[in-house]
């Protein structure tokens, strides 16, 4: 029973913090008109939920964390056949790569690559891995949002909503392609892409700041006087609470920076904790009440945000570093190069995870640390 309570506390804490992190990406993407096909609470896998405005919201089988699938974030150059393949598939409603290759007079491999890229755009529904068929289908369409303040003649024209796999007329292939491209992350200018990438981190830090202001300015805290031993209840001004929040963020930044300093890396790892430590600590703080639970979640939220700033793919900071590199050099980082960088980053974090997991097992389970 104790283990179940610990797991539940960790799931609530980590799940909520990752959820608001991904919520930042989602809100920023939608604000810039970028399509988001999924917004899920939990790790990728089987899910239950509903679809609204082209986005599927739901909960997966492992409700730990969350993710937002922002369209058009695939690296590298676009396939030169996207426009023809998109039009051909939409006219048919559904087709295999071989069908598209025959219609567009391209190789089956080129057709497959274009269809896969369009599926990343949310323009095409790819076959499930468990399906025996290699049938790709045109995505469903949804009514455009209409402004309440200003209506045009176009707003009075009924919109036909197409279902998944339904054939539709394509009178202007280039216009269709441009309308789909306009809803992709890769079509945005540098500053908007940067906002989407850093929005998750911003949400984590804003949540932490809100908690600091709530706890230190609204609720207050108890301080024991060293000379008399008297316990006094105090509050800070909102500005002082924000300053205290920035001081804590600075401490976390310094701790993360110490990971890359050979002289301090070992001690920093020793002072850090893995998912096991977070689970044990989350239960301890939750048992002390809602205020202590909020304080703990604020501290973890800052750590999650700052860790994501590390300029190593696949973290947000790594993707932002790639965007800056591409902006300064006017060169596009290839899919292969980004894959290698991501593998190196994953290997590094896997090593850190294993080391911290081992020390948490020794510390919390065997009491040898």
Image (tube, grey):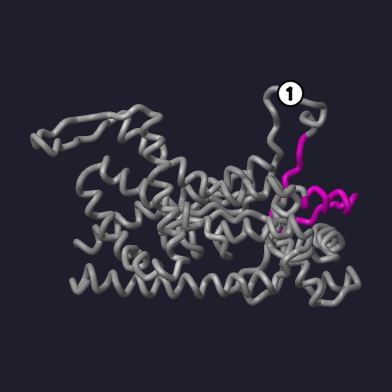
Q: Residue at x 61, y 44 (%)?
A: 28
- Single out the residue that lies furthest toward the left: 228
Classify 128 as above or below 321: below
Q: Residue at x 13, y 39 (%)?
A: 226
Q: Residue at x 38, y 29 (%)?
A: 238
Classify 339 as above or below 179: below
Dominant secondary-structure state across the stretch colored magenta: loop
Residue situated in front as seen by the camera: 104 or 114: 114
Q: Name the spot of residue 102 as percent of width and height, x first.
A: 88, 73
Residue situated in front as seen by the camera: 272 or 141: 272
- Residue 253 highlighted magenta (yes or no): no
Q: Name the spot of residue 275 as percent of width and height, x first.
A: 35, 64
Image quadrant occupied by the C terminus:
bottom left
Q: Which residues are magenta?
A: 158-181
* SS at mark 1 in the image: loop
Q: Residue at x 80, y 62 (%)?
A: 89
User: Would you say 369 lies left or right of 199 here?
Assistant: left
Using a 10 Å C-alpha cutoff, classify the residue at mark 1 as few (fewer than 14 neighbours), some (14 to 19) or many (20 or more): few
Q: Name the spot of residue 141 as percent of width and height, x first.
A: 71, 48
Image quadrant occupied by the N terminus:
bottom left
């Amino acid at each position: 029973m104790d283990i179940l309570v610990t797991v539940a506390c960790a799931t609530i804490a980590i799940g909520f913090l990752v959820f608001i992190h991904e919520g930042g990406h989602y809100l920023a993407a939608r604000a810039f008109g970028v399509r988001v096909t999924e917004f899920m609470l939990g790790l990728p896998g089987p899910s239950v939920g509903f679809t609204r405005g082209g986005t599927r919201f739901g909960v997966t089988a492992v409700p730990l964390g969350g993710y937002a699938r922002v369209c058009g974030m695939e690296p590298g150059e676009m396939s030169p056949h996207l426009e023809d393949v998109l039009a051909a598939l939409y006219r048919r409603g559904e087709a295999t790569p071989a069908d598209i290759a025959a219609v567009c007079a391209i190789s089956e491999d080129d057709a497959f690559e274009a269809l896969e890229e369009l599926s990343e755009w949310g323009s095409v529904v790819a076959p499930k891995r468990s399906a025996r068929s290699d049938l790709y289908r045109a995505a469903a369409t949804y009514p455009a949002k209409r402004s309440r303040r200003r209506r045009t003649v176009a707003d009075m024209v009924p919109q036909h909503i197409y279902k998944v796999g339904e054939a539709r007329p394509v009178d202007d292939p280039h216009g269709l392609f441009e309308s789909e491209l306009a809803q992709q992350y890769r079509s945005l200018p540098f500053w908007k892409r940067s906002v989407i990438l850093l929005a998750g981190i911003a949400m984590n830090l804003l949540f932490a700041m809100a908690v600091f202001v709530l706890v230190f300015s609204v609720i207050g805290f108890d301080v024991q006087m060293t000379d008399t031993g008297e316990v006094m209840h105090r509050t800070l001004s909102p500005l002082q609470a924000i300053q205290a929040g920035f001081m804590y963020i600075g401490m976390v930044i310094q701790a993360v920076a110490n990971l890359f300093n050979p002289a301090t890396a070992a001690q920093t790892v020793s002072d850090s904790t893995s998912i096991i430590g977070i689970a044990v600590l989350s239960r301890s703080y939750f048992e002390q009440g809602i205020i202590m639970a909020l304080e703990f979640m604020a501290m973890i939220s800052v750590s999650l945000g700052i860790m994501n700033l590390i300029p190593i793919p696949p973290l947000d900071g790594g993707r932002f570093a790639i965007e800056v590199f591409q902006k300064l050099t006017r060169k596009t980082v290839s899919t292969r190069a980004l894959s290698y960088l991501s593998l190196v980053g994953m290997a590094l974090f896997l090593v850190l995870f294993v080391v911290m997991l081992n020390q948490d097992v020794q510390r919390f389970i065997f009491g040898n640390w």
